[in-house]
Amino acid sequence: MGPEVDVAVVGGGPAGLAAAVAAKEAGAASVVILEREECLGGILPQCIHTGFGLARFGEDLTGPEYAERYAGLAAEAGVEVLLGTTVLGLAPGPVLRAVNPSVGLFKVHARGVVLAMGCRERTRVQAGIGGTRPAGVFTAGVAQRYLNIEGCLPGQSAVIVGSGDVGLLLARRLTLCGARVAGVYEQLPYASGLMRNVVQCLHDFGIPLHLSHTVLEVHGRGRVEAVTVAQVTEGRPVPGSETVVPCDSLVVSVGLIPENELTRSAGALMDTATGGPVVDSRYRTTLPGVYACGNVVHVHDLVDHVSAAAAVAGADAARPAAGPAVPIVAGDNVRYVVPQRLVTGTPVRVYCRVVRPQRDVELAVCCGSRVIGRRREAAVRPPELLCLDLPAQSPDELTGPVVVNCHPREVA
Amino acid sequence: MGCTELTCILCPQGCQLTVAGRDGEWTIAGNACARGEGYALSEATDPRRVVTATIAVTGAVIPRLPVRTAGAVPKGCVLPLVRELHRLTRSAPVRLGEIILPDALGTGVAVVASRSLPAG
């Protein structure tokens, strides 16, 4: 028999911290975070740029500042933290099986378990980049860690493939640290990162962004010597458009994957569109007593959204709210909707991502012919997560499935 | 008479803005809203950025301390300031918000530690 706690949180990044703090605030007597690393904050300590916390704290914080602020809130709230602790399994109960150097193997029985393991980076192989396998190929997060935590310059001249935010930020960091960034290559016809990062990380430093281009092949034996890039149309390289770009490193920034080995092995129902578990608007998975939040559920672009959603999960894990749930699904030009099930009786924030860029649209949440929420947007892009607040719905109002549509705005 | 092309960053629309003129006589085009005009004007007259970097730290579990400017500094200061910061070393312990440089390159803006690092 291991320790019994009210709420056990797997992962001490922004989602886990917010969930733990919210669980304490909602009245949980004992809350424990199990964190694999030796410090709290997840990826935040290496995200030394600003852009964190505008919604949550009304201040433009760096990643380490945001993490430290939240770790402080957790300490004040009396959250227990187990560092260097890896969770190995999740069984019905729910019970976590974990291991760390001081205790060895142990079990944690909890009334509520919150899964907050975050996400990991897609790699060169997953991006289908061929060629040799020399040193000098990094995912953007690894290169960022080398630079910002270890203080090592990963290369002198880099090519960046993919225009996700981490890749864009890294283009600026590498330049400021004295490396040359030959260019950022993005296979889509638009940047995958936030507009402010395109401007402040690339335009400010004259780093070229090659849209509709990708890296096909890596060259070099011991170390990267060059990469072959090519133009792309409809997802395929254009024959004859190949060029060889000399560089000593390739930084791969081609997206993130929710880290859900634990979730999957425990048997939670998964959503193929998000790569995360199906959750209701209290962030309950289909497993009794098991919640999921943050990048485990879907990849966010702003940490503030992670904290907000995780707080809902943490609060419900401490004090479960009952209520029937109805499915909420993606409609026109919507790739996915989170949560996937709407619990009646409480206000809900719905997050969604569009399939393709569109201008002058109305995002509308409908149940049959009834509109429960709508929002106008001058422009929507797939990289920018959209959110919409819905008022509490009564069960007899929601007679069927709820659909989120992104339609061109009707001209009055 | 200068003419500057900018991408507005205030919303996902990303308007392509054109700023022409000088010294208080500005013509701004391409903005879909009034906020874009303000952005274009500040970018054309006094563009500023918050600078983040790391400096060397001794006696901590990691070798780099993240630092930031407390406010935005003129864009032209970004690279020289980062170069200056790369020459600095601190020793642990360091507290979040501790002043690293009181006046970055004469801008009147301080550079502060953006993380606490205990000794060890």
Image: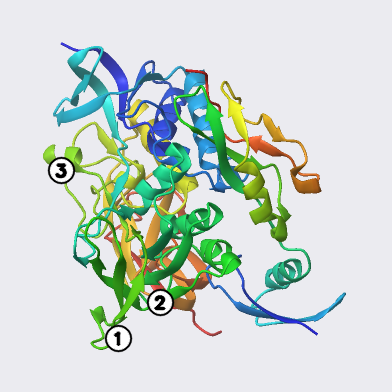
* Chain holding disc 2: A
Q: Secondary structure at mark 3?
A: helix
- Residue A396 x %, y %: 32, 52
Tell me whether the residue at label 1 lies in contact with that at label 2, contact meaning CB atoms closer than 8 angstroms.
no
> Which mark is in front, 1 or 2?
1
Q: Secondary structure at mark 1?
A: loop
* Chain holding disc 1: A
Q: Going 71% across and 51% down the picture, which residue do you hit? A: B72
Find disc 1 in the rendering and name its residue: A241
Q: Earlier in the sequence, mark 2 or mark 3?
A: 2
Name the quadrant containing residue A367: bottom left
Residue type, mark 1 in image:
Ser
- Residue A128 x %, y %: 20, 66
Residue type, mark 3 in image:
Arg
Find disc 2 in the rendering and name its residue: A211
Q: Earlier in the sequence, mark 1 or mark 2?
A: 2
Looking at the rendered structure, whether the residues under marks 1 and 2 are on a common chain is answered as: yes
Find disc 3 in the rendering and name its residue: A264
The outermost residue toward the right is B24
